């Protein structure tokens, strides 16, 4: 029986359907998958990823930096935020890029990440961005990396209650495959999340994915 030819680059090769990835790497692949789904739908979109590097999702930025060559080919930009609320404000702005025909793309799908105390401080941005809605061909996922035992945080936290308060739906994947599946479902919510509708950006719950 012939052995499969496996390389470290397989995880970001969308032609490969059977891969081995960590939770962090799955989030990188998720962005590539969304860009490809949009391309097949006849859309020229871009991706924007930003968040706080000190969160329990702190090594996520390392995966995006390592995958920069793959991201560039798919018009996906990673930019670490100075803090959670500045990063969320930038994501909010990405949903307004083509409102007056000024954008280079049909839409920008966004990915924000942060931890519980950062979710707390970003409440104003989440609430107003949620009321504003996402762009027709954009969409936003917010990843909350909670530190339930206060291992690396000043307080223990559980962020679902905050997102319920600002009326943002929550997706809670149970494994790596569901990170991909639920992420695509979340961005698909954009069809009913344009300004003037009642739909919202989606939040994906993440507790230190491995």
Image (tube, grey):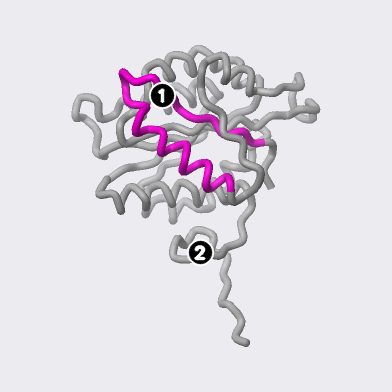
Tag 1 near tag 2, CB within 8 Å: no
Is residue 197 in the magenta section?
Answer: yes
> Which of label 1 and label 2 is nearer to you?
1
Between disc 1 and disc 2, whose residue precedes? 2
Which labelled disc corresponds to residue 199?
1
Magenta includes 181? yes
Which labelled disc corresponds to residue 75? none
Magenta-highlighted residues: 178-206
Q: Is residue 172 above or below residue 13?
A: above
User: Residue 51, percent across and down?
Assistant: 53, 31
Q: Which residue is mark 2?
A: 17
What residue is at 69 percent from the left and 39 percent from the top?
Answer: 208
Q: Residue at x 51, y 48 (%)?
A: 28
- Residue 32 percent coordinates (x, y): 43, 51
Q: Where 41 falls versus 129 (above or below)?
A: below
Residue shown at 40% from the left, 15% from the top: 131
Q: At 53% from the left edge and 42% from the top edge, which residue is drawn?
A: 182
């Amino acid at each position: 029986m012939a052995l499969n030819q496996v390389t470290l680059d397989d995880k970001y090769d969308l032609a490969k359907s059977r891969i081995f990835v960590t939770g962090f790497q799955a989030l990188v692949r998720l962005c590539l998958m969304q860009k490809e789904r949009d391309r097949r739908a006849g859309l020229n979109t871009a991706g924007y990823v930003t968040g706080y590097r000190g969160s329990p999702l702190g090594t996520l930025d390392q995966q995006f930096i390592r995958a920069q060559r793959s991201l560039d080919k798919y018009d996906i930009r990673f930019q670490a935020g100075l803090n959670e609320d500045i990063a969320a404000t930038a994501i909010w702005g990405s949903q307004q890029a083509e409102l007056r025909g000024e954008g280079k793309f049909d839409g920008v799908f966004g990915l924000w990440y942060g931890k519980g105390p950062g979710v707390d401080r970003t409440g104003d941005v989440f609430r107003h961005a949620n009321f504003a809605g996402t762009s027709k061909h954009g969409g936003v996922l917010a990843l909350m990396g909670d530190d339930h035992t206060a291992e690396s945080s000043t307080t223990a936290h559980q962020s679902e209650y905050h997102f319920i308060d600002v009326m943002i739906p929550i997706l809670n994947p149970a494994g790596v495959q569901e990170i991909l599946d639920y992420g695509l479902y979340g961005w698909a919510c954009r069809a009913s999340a344009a300004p003037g509708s009642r739909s919202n950006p989606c939040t994906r719950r993440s507790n230190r994915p491995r």
